[in-house]
C-alpha cells in the first residue's frame, strides 16, 4: 500500500502570521468572509482581533460562534445555512478541534450541494467537488487532526462519533499565530492529548518514515516546552503550536488508535472532552500496545527525556516510555480519573461496541476485545 502526504496548501507560523491570511484572501479576491468559531474564542478576544483585521481590509464578514465543545451534525447544518444566507465565498475557522471539524464539513457540503446531510460524509471521500475555500486559524491547542482531511462529528441522535475522511476537506492554508493564540485553562491536558495523538500515529499499522519523524519530533518539542507554556512563556507557546502542527502531519498521514477511538466514543455519548479521555488513557493503552510496538517505545522514551541505554532491551525501554508519560502527567498535575461520571453496565457495553466499530481500532497495533475496552474505561472512572 503506498504512503501518502496530505496537508494544506500553505502553513504559516509565529507572531504576525495572520497577515498571510489577509494577503491570500485579498489576492484571491474573496469578498464575503464567514468566520466559524466558538464561545471560547470570543471570550479570549481572538474573534475581536480577527474581525478587526477583516474590517480593516474592507471585507464584508459575519461571525458564526455557536460551535459546541465537540462538533455536531447540527453545528454543521447551522453553519451551512448561515453561509448560504450570508452568501459567503470563503470560510475562516478560528479555534481548535471542534471548530475545525465543523468548518471542514461545512465547506465540503457548500461545495457539494447534492450532499444534504452531514452524515452522508461518513466514510472515505464521499464528496466529488472541491469545498468552499477554507482557512484554519488556530487560537488554542489540543487537537492534531485539524490539519488533515479527517472530520469527526457527533451524531447527537445516535450518541456516536461519525468518522469522515475526505480529501476535499483539506484547508487552503493553516495559520498558527501566537498573537491570536490564547492559553487555555486546560493547557496541560491539551498538551498530553497531543502527545497521545503522536504516540498513536507512531505505533499504528499505517505509520511510515515521514509520519514517524514528525510524531517523534512533536513529542520532543511538546515535552520540552509544555511546562513553560503553562506558565505563559510566549516562545514556549509558539513551540507548542509547532508541535501540534507536526502531530497533525503525523496522525493525518498515518492513523490513530485505541485511545482516540475510546475518547471519541465517550465524547459523543457522554460529553466528556476527547482530549481529556485520551490524555488519561495514554499510559494504560501504551501498556496494552507495548508487545506490538517494535522499537518505537525507545524513540518515545528518548523524546520525552528518559534515560535509555543503547543496549536496553525492549522490556526496559517500553517500561521507560510508559513511566515517562506517567511522570509528565504527574508533573502537570493532571487528574487521574474523570469525576462525576457514573456509567452502568449497559452504558459501558454501548461505548465498547462503538469503539470496536471505529476505523482507529483497526489501525491499533494490538488487537483489542470488548472486555479490554470496558476494563480500560473503568480505570479512568474510579
Image (spheres, grey):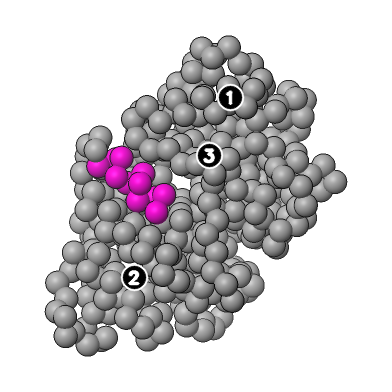
Front of the two marks 2 and 1: 1
Residue that badge 1 annotates: 27
Mark 2 vs mark 3, CA separation in Å: 34 Å
Instruction: Report the side of 153 relative to 286 (left or right).
Output: right
Residue at 62 percent across and 27 percent down: it is 28
Q: Earlier in the sequence, mark 2 or mark 1?
A: 1
- The quadrant holding residue 81 is top right
Residue at x 40% of width, y 31% of height: 17
User: Residue 341, how many percent across, how many down?
Assistant: 48, 59
Percent position (x, y) of residue 61? 62, 20
Q: Nearer the viewer, residue 51 or 11?
A: 11
**Above-or-below relation of 12 to 288:** above
Vertical relation: 172 (above or below) 322: above
Which residues are the magenta region? 236-246
Residue that mark 2 sits on: 283
For mark 1, does the 10 Å Cα neighbourhood hold few (<14), some (14 to 19), or many (20 or more) residues? few
Contact (Cβ within 8 Å) of mark 2 with mark 1:
no
On-image quarter of the N terminus:
bottom right
Q: Does residue 103 appear in this view?
A: yes
Q: Which numbered dot is residue 171?
A: none
Residue depth check, mark 1 versus mark 3: number of the one nearer the observer: 1
Disc 2 to disc 1, C-alpha distance: 47 Å
Residue 237 belongs to magenta span: yes
Is 248 magenta? The answer is no
Residue carrying label 3: 173
| Sequence order check, earlier mark of 1 and 3 | 1
Q: Nearer the viewer, mark 2 or mark 3?
A: 3
Q: Is residue 377 visible from the viewing direction of this image?
A: no
Amino acid at each position: 500500500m503506498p504512503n501518502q502526504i496530505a496537508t494544506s496548501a500553505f502553513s504559516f507560523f509565529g507572531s504576525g502570521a495572520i497577515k498571510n491570511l489577509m494577503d491570500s484572501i485579498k489576492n484571491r479576491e474573496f469578498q464575503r468572509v464567514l468566520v466559524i468559531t466558538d464561545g471560547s474564542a470570543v471570550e479570549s478576544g481572538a474573534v475581536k482581533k480577527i474581525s478587526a483585521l477583516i474590517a480593516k481590509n474592507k471585507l464584508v464578514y459575519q461571525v458564526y460562534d455557536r460551535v459546541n465543545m465537540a462538533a455536531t451534525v447540527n453545528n454543521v447544518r447551522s453553519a451551512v445555512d448561515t453561509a448560504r444566507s450570508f452568501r459567503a465565498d470563503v470560510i475562516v475557522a478560528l479555534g481548535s478541534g471542534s471548530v475545525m471539524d465543523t468548518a471542514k464539513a461545512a465547506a465540503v457540503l457548500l461545495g457539494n450541494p447534492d450532499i444534504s446531510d452531514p452524515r452522508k460524509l461518513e466514510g472515505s471521500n464521499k464528496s466529488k467537488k472541491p469545498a468552499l475555500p477554507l482557512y484554519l486559524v488556530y487560537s488554542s491547542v489540543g487537537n492534531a487532526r485539524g490539519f488533515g482531511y479527517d472530520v469527526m462529528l457527533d451524531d447527537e441522535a445516535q450518541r456516536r462519533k461519525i468518522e469522515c475522511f475526505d480529501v476535499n476537506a483539506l484547508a487552503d492554508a493553516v495559520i498558527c499565530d501566537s498573537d491570536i493564540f490564547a492559553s487555555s485553562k486546560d493547557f496541560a491536558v491539551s498538551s498530553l492529548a497531543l502527545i497521545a495523538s503522536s504516540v498513536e500515529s507512531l505505533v499504528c499499522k499505517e505509520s511510515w518514515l515521514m509520519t514517524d519523524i514528525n510524531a517523534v519530533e512533536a513529542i520532543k518539542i511538546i515535552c520540552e516546552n509544555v511546562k513553560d507554556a503553562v506558565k505563559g512563556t510566549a516562545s514556549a507557546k509558539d513551540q507548542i503550536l509547532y508541535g501540534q502542527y507536526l502531530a497533525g502531519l503525523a496522525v493525518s498521514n498515518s492513523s490513530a488508535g485505541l485511545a482516540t477511538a475510546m475518547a471519541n466514543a465517550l465524547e459523543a455519548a457522554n460529553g466528556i472532552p476527547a482530549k481529556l479521555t485520551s490524555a488519561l488513557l495514554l499510559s494504560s493503552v501504551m501498556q496494552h500496545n507495548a508487545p506490538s510496538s517494535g522499537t518505537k517505545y525507545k524513540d518515545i522514551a528518548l523524546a520525552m527525556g528518559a534515560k535509555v541505554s543503547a543496549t536496553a532491551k525492549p522490556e526496559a525501554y517500553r517500561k521507560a516510555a510508559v513511566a515517562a508519560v506517567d511522570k509528565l502527567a504527574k508533573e502537570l498535575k493532571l487528574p487521574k480519573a474523570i469525576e462525576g461520571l457514573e456509567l452502568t453496565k449497559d452504558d459501558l457495553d454501548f461505548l465498547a461496541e462503538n469503539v470496536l466499530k471505529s476505523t482507529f481500532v483497526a489501525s491499533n497495533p494490538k488487537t483489542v476485545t470488548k472486555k479490554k475496552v470496558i476494563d480500560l474505561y473503568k480505570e479512568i472512572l474510579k
